[in-house]
């Protein structure tokens, strides 16, 4: 037996860089167990906060944000660059930056759930444990170097989020969201998997870097194009790119708002973690031909998202459309495919997670106070809840790309990547900045309602925001302002991460 | 002795003031104006100190955008991997505008002393605006320049949106989107410059000084495109015909102090950008664009003047006259000559003083007569003689009466334009006659003749003349208009050497 124990210990030590994932899985089961006992709703939520905080700390350490050696955790000291599971998973700057995003988003989602869930909500244990599991799925996608773990990760995350979207199953909107999300998600997974299998048939490998090499060597066949198109469509559904975006507004609007945070700021980024890898590393050879198609999708996505957002009267739905537009911006990175552009794309993944996540949390907190997500009810909010309105305004201005907030820097690096590439790529940058200017219209409209309009006559005074909401908002605000004022470490991290894909 | 970071303080002091004002508790809201006054008076004193220092140093005048030429520089790395730094500096072109910023911000606060509606936000936003505008005039890093440029938009949007007139929603959002589109196109031009210079230098930098060393040698094709992008950004801000349509809406709806800052400072950012950035960095593009600039400038001057004649709203008239007068700035810059550029800066400075007076007077007249419609008012001079005298002084200064501030600037612009473009420049000169016509006609109808206003009984025909705080603000401005009119060298001595260096770069000579 002793040998077995030492083998297990050795195994754990070898795979110690997977500690964040392992921790989340362990806690997911602990929460499930605890939910059968007399643990309260709140306590279960705090139980989910713990592993997220620890994992976030470990991931930040592995990214090299601070010196782990000083804390006696030298074996986790960053920057980490290892391959595990026979090369199928890699823990490097690229996967860590995504994990950082997923964990932060999950943390915001859990914190805002603490006040969002009421005594009417059943199965709270399952709820929190599914959030943790879906986060693990996303983290696996970020690490995957092979199509199989990539797909498995996507499925773990998706299936958990289908259930989460329909969590309030007695609420018609939530049930509809869950059903829609499930059907679209399952279809797109099937398309994705079929595309992968065709590529496997052509190249005989599932390893992503190897795939690139094989496809580069082999002649172009109709099957390659079919496989690539299916992959594009499958991931396009997941990231809600036009014309595969129809599901997103309904699902984002119908889901419980903390889950919308997870979907819009987290699981959408999972599709980008996969897309960057597959299209930029895996299909370097195909880039020239596919770049243009993706550029068209990118411009369409941002334009359709922004134009549709203009006419929305529900803030939550408007943010859902703005999410589609942001997908369009990030797709510029895939289309251009240079190091600067990819760094910009990664940075935008980071900043978007915080500003969009923060905006949805703010929507949830405002709904908690005034029981409405309608723009008209935001009238005079700045007088009734000044701090909350200020946070919301900062997130919206950051989304619009107004300096010196986080969103400005990521858009800046992203668009300058397109300008740097020159040629017709510059037009992508022009489309991007004009779209940003357009988006300012609907963001400014929300700010106008909050700040310019006076509150309605008999508007009751508002309670203060509950602490968990405040904590989630604080995380997002801190990130938006910190990245805004001191973007250097984040730009470096994104550039290093981009460097692992494009040396 | 540790050197005082004067330029940073010019940005930092109003910023701190704004934060304090925003954080005031509700019941202390009345203190907002005092705090705003103190935190805008300090930068004014600093800028006077700066003026005096600059005058006594008389810096080297060799070169343009060189580190010899720019004084009081502060440099700190900000985002080194992208070559972004926090760097400020002033030369003879930016200094008068920095002074103007501090002066008008302070006087606008004094003028709005009786603002009772949401005073914390009101005065805080004014201070934030001062931060942005002063930053634009001092930034030596493109990136910082762009950030300050954008910072200005937000307070202006709220000033129009909250304290504006009946169509404030439309005007505020139009202003915001219009000028934001212009700035992002400008940003694309800046990005293009960055990458082209990176290819030459081997490293990326947003430093204007370093880019200025390299960019004039870039290919002509690139310079055309980049100049077009920058020019669009600046021309929309100035604004020049045909990008001017946001201005009348914004002005008519903005509160008085907002109009003062908008016309007095924000428009100057466009002219300053043209002279500071677009001309020296892209000389080939600038030379190619001269015909375009001249046509747009002349169109703005003449068309703006015609629009003024047609207006019945006093404030709208003053707003359109800004388009006409900013046309002179572009015309002066388009000559690419030392005199033209120097005169353009002088024109910006004096236009800032004069429109401030005129917009304040529009506010006073609106407040006291209850309307700004020229046709409904008459004979105001009988009722409010002091205000009438100030309005007349502002009008005379604006139409270019010799001895008052704007005469020298306009005269020099025309001189430079005749030298550069020849006899066709009689076209804009006609606008001077038109300007005289619309100002005198308006003054005649509003101030003299029969008193037409129908006042409610209880007022017994009494109208409020200038309040003390209004009189203080206006008195200082009128005094400065007279001072600069009599001693234009106060500004020209600063601008001439720098303008000469710039003209040398552009090959325009004398």
Image (cartoon, grey):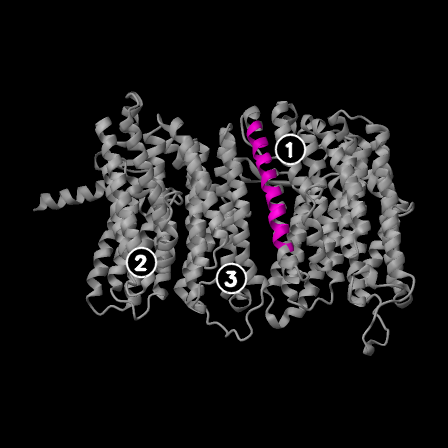
Which residue is at the far left?
Answer: A1
Find disc 2 in the rendering and name its residue.
A176
What distance separates the C-alpha of mark 2 from that of mark 1? Answer: 51 Å
Q: Residues within 10 Å of mark 1 (few under 14, many from 20)?
A: some
Which residue is more in the foreground, B412 or A236? A236
What distance separates the C-alpha of mark 1 from that of mark 3? Answer: 39 Å
SS of the residue under disc 3: helix
User: Disc 2 is attached to a residue of which chain?
Assistant: A
User: Disc 3 is attached to a residue of which chain?
Assistant: A
Find disc 1 in the rendering and name its residue.
B228
Q: Of the numbered discs in the image, which one, if any, rests on residue B55?
A: none
Which of label 1 and label 3 is nearer to you? 1
In reply to whether residue B175 is colored magenta, the answer given is yes
User: Disc 1 is attached to a residue of which chain?
Assistant: B
Taking the spot 60% from the left edge, 26% from the top edge, the residue there is B222
Find disc 3 in the rendering and name its residue.
A389
Q: Is any atom of residue A206 visible in this view? A: no
Taking the spot 86% from the left edge, 45% from the top edge, the residue there is B434
């Amino acid at each position: 037996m002793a040998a077995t124990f030492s083998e297990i210990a050795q195994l754990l030590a070898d795979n110690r860089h997977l500690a964040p994932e392992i921790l989340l899985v362990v806690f997911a089961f602990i929460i499930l167990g605890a939910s059968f006992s007399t643990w309260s709703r709140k306590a279960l939520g705090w139980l989910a906060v713990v592993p997220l905080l620890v994992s976030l700390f470990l991931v930040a350490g592995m990214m090299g944000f601070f010196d782990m050696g000083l804390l006696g955790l030298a074996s986790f000291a960053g920057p980490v660059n290892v391959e595990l599971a026979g090369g199928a998973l890699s823990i490097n700057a690229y996967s860590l930056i995504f994990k950082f995003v997923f964990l932060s988003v999950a943390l915001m989602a859990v914190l805002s759930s603490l006040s969002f869930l009421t005594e009417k909500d059943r199965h709270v244990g399952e709820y929190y444990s599914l959030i943790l599991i879906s986060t693990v799925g996303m983290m696996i996608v970020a690490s995957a170097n092979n199509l199989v773990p990539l797909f498995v990760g996507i499925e773990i995350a998706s299936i958990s989020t289908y259930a989460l979207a329909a969590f309030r199953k007695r609420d018609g909107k939530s049930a509809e969201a869950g059903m829609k999300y499930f059907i679209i998600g399952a279809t797109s997974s099937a398309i994705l998997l079929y595309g992968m299998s065709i590529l496997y048939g052509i190249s005989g490998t599932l390893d992503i870097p190897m795939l690139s090499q094989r496809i580069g060597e082999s002649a172009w066949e109709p099957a390659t194009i079919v496989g690539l198109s299916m992959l594009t469509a499958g991931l396009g559904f997941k990231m809600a790119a036009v014309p595969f975006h129809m599901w997103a507004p309904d699902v984002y609007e119908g889901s419980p708002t903390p889950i919308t945070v997870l979907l819009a700021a987290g699981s959408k980024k999972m599709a980008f973690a996969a897309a960057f890898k597959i299209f930029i590393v895996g299909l370097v050879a195909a880039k020239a031909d596919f770049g243009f198609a993706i550029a068209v999708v990118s411009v369409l996505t941002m334009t359709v998202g922004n134009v549709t957002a203009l006419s929305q009267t529900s803030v939550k739905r408007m943010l859902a459309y703005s999410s589609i537009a942001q997908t369009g911006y990030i797709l510029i990175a895939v289309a251009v495919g240079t190091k600067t552009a990819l760094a910009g794309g990664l940075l935008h993944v980071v900043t978007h997670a915080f500003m969009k996540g923060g905006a949805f949390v703010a929507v949830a907190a405002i709904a908690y106070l005034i029981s409405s997500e309608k723009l008209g009810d935001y009238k005079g909010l700045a007088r009734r809840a000044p701090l909350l309105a200020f946070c919301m305004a900062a997130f919206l201005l950051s989304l619009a790309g107004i300096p010196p907030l986080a969103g400005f820097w990521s858009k800046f690096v992203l668009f300058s990547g397109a300008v740097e590439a020159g040629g017709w790529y510059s037009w992508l940058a022009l489309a991007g900045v004009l779209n940003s200017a357009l988006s300012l219209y609907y963001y400014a409209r929300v700010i106008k309602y909050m700040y310019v309009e006076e509150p309605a006559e008999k508007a009751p005074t508002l309670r203060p925001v509950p602490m968990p909401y405040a904590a989630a908002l604080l995380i997002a605000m801190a990130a938006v302002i910190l990245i805004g004022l001191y973007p250097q470490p984040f730009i470096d991290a994104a550039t290093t991460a981009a460097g692992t894909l494009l040396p | 002795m540790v050197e005082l970071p004067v330029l940073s303080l010019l940005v930092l002091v109003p910023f701190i003031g704004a934060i304090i004002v925003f954080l005031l508790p509700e019941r202390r809201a009345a203190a907002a104006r005092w705090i705003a006054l103190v935190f805008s008076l300090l930068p004014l004193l600093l800028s006077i100190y700066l003026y005096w220092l600059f005058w006594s140093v008389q810096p080297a005048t060799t070169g343009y955008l060189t580190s010899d030429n720019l004084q009081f520089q502060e440099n700190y790395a900000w985002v080194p991997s992208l070559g972004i730094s926090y760097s400020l500096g002033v030369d003879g072109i930016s200094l008068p505008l920095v002074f103007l910023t501090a002066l008008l911000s302070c006087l606008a606060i004094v003028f709005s002393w009786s603002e009772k509606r949401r005073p914390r936000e009101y005065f805080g936003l004014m201070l934030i605006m001062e931060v942005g505008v002063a930053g634009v005039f001092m930034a030596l890093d493109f990136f910082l320049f762009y950030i300050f440029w954008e910072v200005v938009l937000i307070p202006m949007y709220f000033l129009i949106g909250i304290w504006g007139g009946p169509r404030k929603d439309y005007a505020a959002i139009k202003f915001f989107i219009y000028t934001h589109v212009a700035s992002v196109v400008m940003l694309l031009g800046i990005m293009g410059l960055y990458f082209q210079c990176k290819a030459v230098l081997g490293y990326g930098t947003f430093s204007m000084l370093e880019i200025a060393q390299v960019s004039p040698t870039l290919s002509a094709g690139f310079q055309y495109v980049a100049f077009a992008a920058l020019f669009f950004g600046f021309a929309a801000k100035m604004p020049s015909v045909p990008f001017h349509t946001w201005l009348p809406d914004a002005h008519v709806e903005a509160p008085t102090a907002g109009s003062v800052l908008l016309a007095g400072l924000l428009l100057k950012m466009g002219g300053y950008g043209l002279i500071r950035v677009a001309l020296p960095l892209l000389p080939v593009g600038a030379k190619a664009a001269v015909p375009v600039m001249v046509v747009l400038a002349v169109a703005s001057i003449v068309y703006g003047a015609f629009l003024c004649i047609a207006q019945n709203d006093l404030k709208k008239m003053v707003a359109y006259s800004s388009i006409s007068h900013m046309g002179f700035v572009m015309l002066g810059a388009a000559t690419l000559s030392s005199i033209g550029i120097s005169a353009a800066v002088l024109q910006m400075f004096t236009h800032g003083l004069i429109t401030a007076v005129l917009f304040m007077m529009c506010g006073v007249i609106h407040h006291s007569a209850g309307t700004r419609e020229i046709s409904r008012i008459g004979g105001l001079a009988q009722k409010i003689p002091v205000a009438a005298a100030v309005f007349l002084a502002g009008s005379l200064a604006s139409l270019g009466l010799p001895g008052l501030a704007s005469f020298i600037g306009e005269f020099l612009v025309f001189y430079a334009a005749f030298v550069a473009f020849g006899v066709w420049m009689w076209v804009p000169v006609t606008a001077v006659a038109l300007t005289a016509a619309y100002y005198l006609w308006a003054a005649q109808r509003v101030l003299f003749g029969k008193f037409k206003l129908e006042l409610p009984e209880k007022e017994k025909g009494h109208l409020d003349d200038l309040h003390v705080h209004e009189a203080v603000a206006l008195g200082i401005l009128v005094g400065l208009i007279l001072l600069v009119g009599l001693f234009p060298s106060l500004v020209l001595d600063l601008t001439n050497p720098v303008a000469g260096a710039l003209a040398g770069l552009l090959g325009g000579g004398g």
